[in-house]
Image: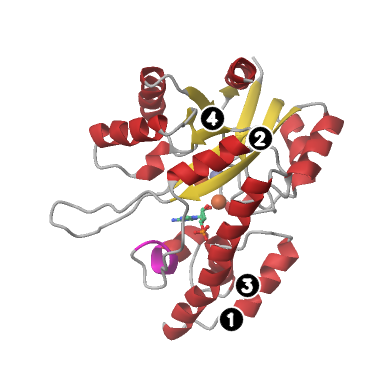
Amino acid sequence: MSFVDLHCHSTASDGTIPPEDLPALAVSLGLSAIAMTDHDTTCGVPACKAACETAGIDFVPGIEISADPGPRIDTDGVERRRGTLHLLGLFVRHDDPELAKISSRMREARNSRNPAIIEKLQALGVRITYDEVLTLAQEQGTQVIGRPHIAQLLVAKSYAKSLSDAFTKYLKFGAPAFLRRDYLSPAQAIDAIHHAGGLAILAHPVQLVMPNTDELEHAIKRLADIGLDGIETRHCDHTPALTLQYEKFAQRFKLLTSGGSDFHGDRKTVKLGSQNVPRAVYEQMLCSRKQTQ
Ligand code: AMP
Ligand code: FE
Ligand code: FE
Ligand code: ZN
């Protein structure tokens, strides 16, 4: 059986492998299709597409858009934790003007938040400057500068033991240097993906951090009602039991299933292709696109 990977990041956002180098790696691992899904940018798509053609594997142009999951207020009225709501746009036209508009809005939201995070870190006594973040990002050729790059600097300067330690100690929701940023609503993100001719897939549902299965089901139903096309059932954060549960939701709401490693190169431990996503998942998407076109 041949396998595919429909969730990969490159240096265009917070991965560490350049978009043009991913296809050769995919081929060496026996994959027959990959999707390039950088955070809030499609700028790695043309280079990855060309390299896929050379390497002889199928290519899915994509993007991963962060949307507002809404507040999570617990029964005592306190906001304890917000999960993340990420939408993958698969088969998008990478140069769609609507997608470009919201991507640049999201990059601006990060670009105005990043210096403010640095100020918070400085107030905590961390000796780090925004210029250092910019230099690091430039060296890596990234278009989307975010907390992962700040985390990398915190590790390099021995303020944290690892990237996830940097998030826990400083950067994640509830940590002392956390700062909210502006997010799109899920409807805006789904509409933009559709405008660009893509399929909107709920990425890693486990990261919504819903308090129970009923609420998760409600959340998926609400997304399906506003046009969601599919759910990422196979993902490195999902146990086999979760994958099964999400497959049942997909059936219930007549949604496609998707799967990928969420490969970030050296920034995360997960390996490209590690989710063993059958090629049939990709073929099913092609089929559903043909029916709607
Ligand atoms: P940002 O877009 O600046 O809000 O950063 C979000 C990115 O940071 C995500 O796409 C992840 O790649 C990474 N990230 C978020 N939370 C964590 C965490 N707890 N540990 C490591 N990486 C994280
Ligand atoms: Fe990421
Ligand atoms: Fe994500
Ligand atoms: Zn991702």
Identified at 72% across, 61% down, the residue is 140
**Is 66 left, or right, of 138 in this rendering?**
left
Label 4 beta carbon within 8 A of ligand 4: no
Q: Quadrant of the N terminus?
A: top right
Against 52, is 96 above or below?
A: below
Badge 4 marks a residue whose secondary structure is strand
Q: Secondary structure at mark 1?
A: loop
Q: Which mark is residue 259?
A: 4
Amino acid carrying label 1: it is: Thr
Does the image show residue 265?
no
Q: Tag 3: residue type?
A: Val
Q: Provide residue 214's location: percent of width, then percent of height.
A: 24, 32
Numbered tag placed on residue 6 in the rendering = none
Measure the C-alpha gap from mark 4 to mark 3.
32 Å
Q: Mark on residue 35?
A: 2
> Which residue lies most toward the left here?
76
Q: Which residue is mark 1?
A: 129
How crowded pointer 1 is (Cα within 10 Å; few <14, some 14-19, many 20+) is rated as some
Q: CA distance from mark 2 to mark 4?
A: 10 Å
CA distance for labels 1 and 3: 7 Å
* Whether label 1 touches label 4, CB < 8 Å: no
Give the distance between the C-alpha atoms of the residues marked 1 and 2, in whole angstroms.
34 Å
Which numbered disc flags the more N-terminal residue, 4 or 3? 3
| Mark toward the viewer: 1 or 2 | 2
Which sits earlier in the primary sequence, circle 2 or circle 4?
A: 2
Against 154, is 275 above or below?
Answer: above
Count neighbours of disc 4 (C-alpha within 10 A) and say few if under 14, some if 14 to 19, many if 20 or more. Answer: many
Q: Earlier in the sequence, mark 1 or mark 2?
A: 2
User: Which labelled disc corresponds to residue 133?
Assistant: 3
Residue 288 place in picture, x, y as percent: 58, 18
Q: Which residues are magenta?
A: 168-173
Residue 206, image x, y percentages: 38, 39
